[in-house]
Image (cartoon, rainbow, N blue to C red):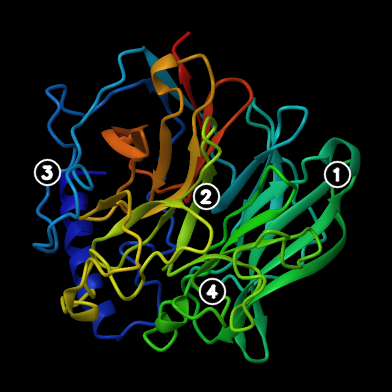
Amino acid sequence: MTVKEQNQLTMHKKIFHIICGIGLMAVACNNGESNAAATDKPDTSGIASNSTDSTGKPVETEKANTDYKPAFPGQTRIAGVKTKTPWEFKVITSGLSNPWGIAELPDGRFLVTEKAGTMRIVSKDGKVSDKINGAPAVNANGQGGLLGLTLDPAFSKNRMVYWVYSEKTADGNLTAVAKGKLSDDGASLQNPVVIYRATPAHNSSLHYGGRILFDKNGYLMVSTGERSDKETRPLAQSLQAGLGKIVRITTDGKPAPGNPFLKDKNARPEIWSYGHRNVQGLAWHPVTGDLWENEFGPRGGDELNRIEPGKNYGWPSITYGIEYAGPKISDGATQKEGLEQPVYYWDPVLSPSGMAFYSGDAIPEWKNNLFIGGLSSMHIARLVIENNKVVGEERLLSGEKERFRDVFNASDGALYAVTDGGKMYRIGKKN
């Protein structure tokens, strides 16, 4: 991308934020979370080139959207760090179409969802399969489509796959969870069935959430969005709605045993946590076993949270962001009693999507670090976390100018990432 093109892109983003704030566009007005793919370019591979300041200055140098003060030191703009181990990246393939989620098959290949409603299998040498048939139709408008996926812990025996998608209903669109069996030849999903729907449905094409993971007890953790509109925002605070939540369900879609609101007649029993805006990143810490999530703020205020059952994470009652046109949200409140503070937040935004903790041994200094795909920010954020606090941040692959949609910690000791532009990257130790 030329300097002129970059300047034009920056100007277009500013105009986009203003238009979104006054409601003149029925598109994805979520801090750069549009669904247009990034400008693509030929396959590249190379040695890591870091833009991080080696003196420990924060990696973010742009002016914040607000003058809000963090609740504690290190909650934002933490000191920059730089990887010392030589590492490299390589584009495995450019043959995907708006990939969204990644899961690793037992043989080392990857099962990947594509926004338009298809799945494909990608080998580590970059071979992309034909479309996998059988998944229910998705509503791919706006931010919708075929979203996150995960494999059954017993996949090698039962070949069950679970995925999240946006479903069109008579009452509007909603976040749905489905399951199906991947055929032995990998060509189709057999007997697909919807097991959960986050209601109420709403006529919006924004903020579906869409990540899904298994916990150690064999239950599913699923993130949902609050659907963006001001009329649905308050439902993130409602225990009687499935919007703006992380839910915990069985493989049949029932509330899982041990959920915090099982005995509350005024709450949905599947709810695990609430007060979320649009969660597109979920990951388990490999040592503590804690659930971490990231979510989009509005203009500023993207968050990283450590999730505890039954807790309220604040949206829209508190936020470190503002409306796209500038007005404060909830009278500018960033802290309130009984509402959880983010472990870390970004302003300007990261536009965070899929994320993974690194648990490999190839690059020891990355051990237990968190890697988050950035969309409008066009880089992967590496966060060093100690005692549940972020103590360092690094930007990786910022020179690629790609919207990083998901990051996956693979069994070969490398990270794999997919981009809206259709690429899959391998990121690992330099050979």
Foreground mark, 3 or 2, reads 2
Dot 2 crowding, Cα within 10 Å, few <14, some 14–19, many 20+: many
Q: Which residue is mark 4?
A: 141
Q: Are marks 3 and 2 in contact (CB under 8 Å)?
A: no
Tell me if 328 is positioned left or right of 298 in this view: left
Foreground mark, 2 or 1, reads 2
Q: CA distance from mark 1 to mark 3?
A: 47 Å
Foreground mark, 4 or 3, reads 3
Residue at x-position 50% and y-position 38% = 356
Q: Is residue 87 above or below residue 96?
A: above
Q: CA distance from mark 4 to mark 2?
A: 23 Å
Q: CA distance from mark 3 to mark 2?
A: 27 Å
Q: Earlier in the sequence, mark 2 or mark 1?
A: 1
Q: For the residue marked with disc 1, what is the amino acid?
A: Arg
Q: Nearer the viewer, residue 97 or 347?
A: 347
As drawn, the label of residue 159 is: 1
Residue at x-position 64% and y-position 82% = 265
Q: CA distance from mark 2 to mark 1?
A: 22 Å
Q: CA distance from mark 4 to mark 3?
A: 34 Å
Foreground mark, 4 or 2, reads 2
Residue 183 drawn at (x, y percent): 89, 47
Foreground mark, 1 or 4, reads 1
Residue 419 drawn at (x, y percent): 47, 46
Q: Which residue is mark 3?
A: 61
Res 188 seen here: no
